[in-house]
Image (cartoon, rainbow, N blue to C red):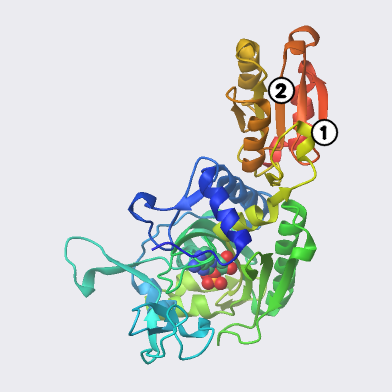
Amino acid sequence: MSNAPETDLMSKIVALCKRRGIIFQSSDMYGGINGFWDYGPYGVPIRRSVERLWWKYMVEERDNVVGLDSTIICHPQVWHASGHVEQFSDLMTDCMDCKRRHRVDQLPEQGVCPACGSTKLTEPREFNLMMKTYVGPVLDEEHAAYLRAETCQPIFVDFNIVRVATRQQLPFGIAQTGKAFRNEINPRNFTFRSREFMQMEMEFFCHEDDAMDWFDYWHEQRWKFYTDILGIDEKKLRIYWHEKLAHYAKKALDIEFEFPFGWGEVEGVHHRGDWDMSRHCEYSKQEKDCKYFDAERKESYFPTVVETSCGLDRLCLLLICNGYDEDTAATAKEGQDEDVRIVLRLPAKVAPVQCAVLPLSKKLEEPATKLFHAIRKRFRSEYDVTGSIGKRYRRQDEIGTPYCITFDFDSLEDNAVTVRDRDSMTQERISLDQITKYLNEKINPELC
Ligand code: GAP
């Protein structure tokens, strides 16, 4: 059931992620399960720190955005109101020869199975992407429920409780991060299209007259997150403007990144009109929870929503693809035999290990461990004493460690260590009493 990676470079990235315990298929020993991915010890810190950066930028540093953490399963009526039960579907077709299922809009050649070349395809039919389950012991339609297909719907449902509790006036936003589930017909491109994934969404509630200005504001803010906070080169990013809009939407764009398999959407910014709040009012009949009384305008109305919706797993994949490098020039410098150095040039603030302490000899374990214990209080750190120093550098390069600290016999005399920079491979001698200050300036742990 495994995914076939689309390009050579993608296969190398997928292989590296598994080899180094970053991301790998769920249930690997059973052959994997398509569209589900586990984050290993070096993947968890990447995902957590990206999520933390997003939360700080979107919630903690703003007065007008507050947080929420809702359940994955909510009242099934929520998904009727949102339109997901009726409309959240893709057109699919089955191959009668190889039995594979395809999305009609993704067929390279209409009427031909891309897997086996057969032309015996069934008539296209709608396939709902919601994952269904049953709440309680009775497995009938009355007890059916859905795993949330997007994190934003509970935000609309909880709008009024959150607004009253936080004494927010419009305009303000509610943000949440968490799991979403979609029964994608064709999961592919590693974690890019998964069946279980994480979203980071913010719904900004405002008056419809102001919504276009807020759309422009959030467009700019979200672009800055990629360029200024994550340091992504603008050349690898672009905006795709939607020409075909959902019937309720007024404006929509995607922020896309150039992945090895082509340009792909990482985030959407959407002007959703008052669709969400008016639909929840229609289905719940709770007008007081869905409308807002604007004391300045002296009117009561359904808030208009501007949404920023980012896929956390896609963002991690972006960082991994952006950081993956095969460095051919530098290997001779460190007396290594191999031709290429695989290096993951992740920003220090999201690197799973920010500094590794590497004693040159086991005899130096005691003072080196002391240093390691002091450093790991502030930075994500690792201690490694096994194998040649060259091999240890390579391992740290592959998981994206920006700084390796070598403790050698001279350290006992001069109370200094050598700090090796992952990207330039330059080495600097830093005195032990300056090492925390030095790393602080380089890594800035307040940001991660
Ligand atoms: N609330 C709006 C919404 O969910 P979407 O374009 O369907 O909009 C938003 O999804 C983001 O969620 C996408 O830009 C993408 O980053 C992420 N996403 C959507 N489907 C995904 C999937 N199958 N696997 C991984 N990420 C996905």
- From the image, tell me which residue sits under label 2: 406
- Mark 1, ligand 1, within 8 Å: the answer is no
Relative to 43, residue 256 above or below: below
In which of the image's four quarters is ligand 1 placed?
bottom right
Query: Is there CB contact under 8 Å for labels 1 and 2?
Result: no
Foreground: 222 or 172? 222
Can residue 50 be seen in the rendering of this structure? yes
- Image coordinates of residue 434 in percent, x first then y, are 79, 20
Secondary element at image label 1: loop
Which circle marks residue 426 in the picture?
A: 1
Q: Amino acid at mark 1?
A: Thr
In the rendered image, the residue lying farthest to the front is 337
In the rendered image, the residue lying farthest to the top is 413
- Image coordinates of residue 380 in percent, x first then y, are 62, 33
Q: Is residue 262 left or right of residue 234?
A: left
- Quadrant of the frame with the C terminus: top right
Point 71% across, 57% down: residue: 225
